[in-house]
Amino acid sequence: MSKYILCASSPLRIWTIDTSAKTVGGPVTLDWKRWDPNHEFPFTFVADAARSLVYHTSASKSVQEIDVSNPKSPTVKQLQTSKGVNLMCAALAGGFGQPSHVDQRLYAGGSDGFIYTFPLDSSGKTRKATSDPAPYEVLEAHNRPIIDLAITSDGTHAFALIQSNDGKAAAVTKDLKPMPHPPRVHYLADRPQWDTIPNPRHIKLSPDERHLIVTSDGYNCTIIDTTTNESHLRSLASDAWVGPVYVDNTSAYFCNAIRDFHNVELASGGVAKSGTSSGLVGLAGIGDGHVLLTTSENSSGDLTCVLFTYDGKERVDIAKMNFSAGGECLLFGRNLMLEGG
């Protein structure tokens, strides 16, 4: 694949990148809502690549469903809960053979400690604009916000990070199992939780679902074995203030604040550096096994960009990309890269 789409927030914009021609089209601006840099939960993106859909959360009362099948003319639909709560994060289950009650849903973590779900609409191509009336209740949240989610491929378990006032948070496992009718709350859970993880921000599940990777602000990550429920604090090679840029069944790959690439072995905790130091300053996008890094911004808003593979071993240089409508979106490594365009 030689074409990629970059989705960025503050404001919500889309670029198309042709790595063969080394050219960039856009941006196409979808709205001009700007993110407050003092806000603790700026934004997240989730891709449903099979349907050319991207979901954008910004701790507001709606999730934006963006159809990027034609990235030069994308369309946006707002998804909201019936309770009007703020939606902090989103996740999708990744596999087939899901039970009918969770089949292909979008999951969104609420500011009230509930997980809301948005099933497919009658077209099978997009999702319903309003969540199902009975959400998943995360009892351990005690009505605190859910700040990140990971869902098993069969849609039967959720792993949630819960915000805490003391700088720690719980990573909680939820059984997504329908309760007898009529339910007051559609789902309950009584699975393990890990409440000693300092300042967690991101949670990621390995493809074989054997390991959870929880990252925080700093030089550590916590790796949880989902079969034994054991957790281990692992040291990173350097400060990685975003979650892993890629995870396979053996390693989690990181690109740190000074743009060095390294990985952590999930089983042993061993750390290996790739030997690649990009020398670039901005982390503009992550996704589909790639990382888009940038130089510092000039007066016109144009940046030189380099598209790296997740391990830093391959690169494509792009001479000019315009970020003049809000360069602060490069600060937090939350923008989404996906194949297409």
Image: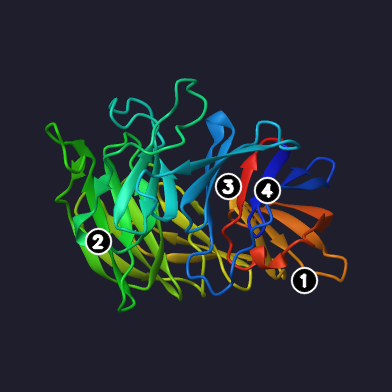
Q: Are there few (<14), some (14-19), or many (20+) residues within 10 Å of tag 1?
A: few
Q: Which residue is found at the position 36% from the left and 40% from the top?
A: 117
Give coordinates of residue 79: x percent, y percent. Answer: 48, 41
Question: Residue 296: which numbered mark, if any?
Answer: 1
Q: Nearer the viewer, residue 225 or 340?
A: 340
Q: Is residue 90 above or below residue 238?
A: above
Q: Is residue 146 above or below residue 282?
A: above
Give the quadrant of the N terminus: top right
Label 2 vs label 1, nearer the camera: 2
Q: In the displayed orientation, state which residue is furthest to the bottom.
A: 166
Question: Is residue 151 shown left or right of residue 325?
Answer: left
Q: Which residue is found at the position 32% from the left and 48% from the top?
A: 115
Question: Residue 6: which numbered mark, if any?
Answer: 4
The kind of residue tagged 2 is Ala
Q: Are marks 2 and 3 in contact (CB under 8 Å)?
A: no
Question: Is residue 339 shown left or right of residue 143?
Answer: right
Give the quadrant of the C terminus: top right
Q: CA gap, disc 4 to disc 3?
A: 13 Å
Q: Are there few (<14), some (14-19), or many (20+) residues within 10 Å of tag 3?
A: some
Q: Nearer the viewer, residue 142 or 244?
A: 142
Q: Earlier in the sequence, mark 4 or mark 1?
A: 4
Q: Earlier in the sequence, mark 4 or mark 3?
A: 4
Question: Residue 289: which numbered mark, if any?
Answer: 3
Label 3 vs label 1, nearer the camera: 1
The kind of residue tagged 1 is Ser
Q: Which residue is found at the position 44% from the left and 62% from the top?
A: 264
Query: In the structure shown, which secondary structural element does the residue marked by tag 3 occupy?
Result: loop
Q: CA gap, disc 2 to disc 3?
A: 32 Å
